[in-house]
Amino acid sequence: MDPQRLRVFLVDDHPIVLAGVKALVQADDELEVIGEARDGRTALRLATELNPDIAVLDISLPGLSGTKLAEQLRIACPKCKLLALTVHEDRGYLRQLLEVGVLGYVVKRSATDELIRAIHVVAAGGVYIDPSIAGKIVGNNNQTSSERPAGSSTDLSEREVDVLKLTAAGHSNKSIATALAIGVKTVETYKARAMEKLGFQTRVELVRYALSRGWLEDS
């Protein structure tokens, strides 16, 4: 094993999918697959023994669901960062998984383009949400301040809220700048100012806050 590589553990009950995901991960020189499992209980046992840096989990697993597996892995392997790879595009799954500590959510149909990027973002301490889900979330940007729930977000300007929603949804500063037709530096300023107002240091805090405000909910 190369100590410089990120150690990745894979869980999926479909052998063809598992083989495909493994090939994607192994093609990246900075990643190393150290184990795999096809059901939740085996995954919990092996991941606890191997203590990977990243675990990529399917949601629908025999024996122990992906959500329950994530909950137990957070206790058994507290340093292991969790990423869901799933066919489900329902944001209800996204909310459920983020609440139990999953930091990445990638839809299987976009795995070829998104999975490796997501692994690196999560490994670096970020939160990654598949753009196909994030794009649907952004449709809720036009609430007026009177429609927003009462709380600390009332101290934020409308533009600061827009920037935070897009950030929580996994967009980069560049894509936010494009979406809002403003400069990247302006995005950084809005984000920094809003995060300071809310007292947040990390994107994980922001995503949890976004969940509590209903920003990641269906309309």
Image (cartoon, helix red, strand yellow):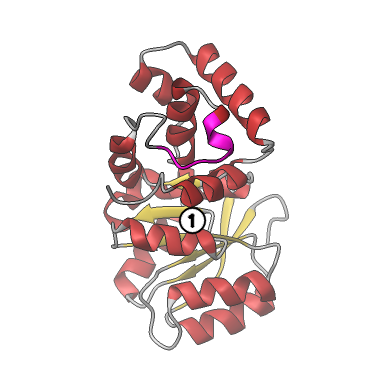
Compared to residue 218, the image places residue 184 above or below, namely above
Height in image: 146 above or below 31? above
Q: Can residue 29 be seen in the rendering of this structure?
A: no
For the N terminus, the image quarter is: bottom right
Examine the rendered structure and indicate whether residue 80 appears above or below residue 168.
Answer: below
On the image, numbered disc 1 is attached to which residue?
A: 26
Whether residue 150 appears in magenta in the rendering, the answer is yes
Residue stretch rendered in magenta on the structure: 148-154
Q: Type of residue at label 1?
A: Gln
Q: Relative to residue 80, is residue 216 depicted above or below?
A: above
**Number of marks in the image?**
1
Left or right of 3 in this view: 13 = left
Report the front residue among 113 and 146.
146
In-image side of 213 versus 82 (left or right): left
Specify whether residue 156 is in view. Answer: yes
The residue sitting at 63% across, 44% down in the picture is: 124
Which percent across, then down, holds residue 177?
42, 18
Binning the other alpha carbons within 10 Å of mark 1 as few (below 14), some (14 to 19) or many (20 upward) gives: some
Which element is circle 1 on? helix
Measuring 52% from the left and 13% from the top, which residue is drawn there? Answer: 186
Q: Residue 60 at what x, y percent from top left? A: 35, 75
Q: Quadrant of residue 21?
A: bottom left
Residue located 49% across and 24% down the image: 173
In this rendering, position of residue 103 left or right of residue 93 = right
Residue 29 location (% of width, % of height) = 55, 47
| Front in this rendered view, residue 145 or 130 | 145
Residue lying at 51% horizontally and 19% vertically, measured from the top left: 187
Q: Could you say where residue 10 lies in the image, as x and y percent from the top left?
A: 49, 68
- In the rendered structure, the answer to whether residue 185 lies left or right of residue 125 reads left
- Decide whether residue 160 is among the magenta residues: no
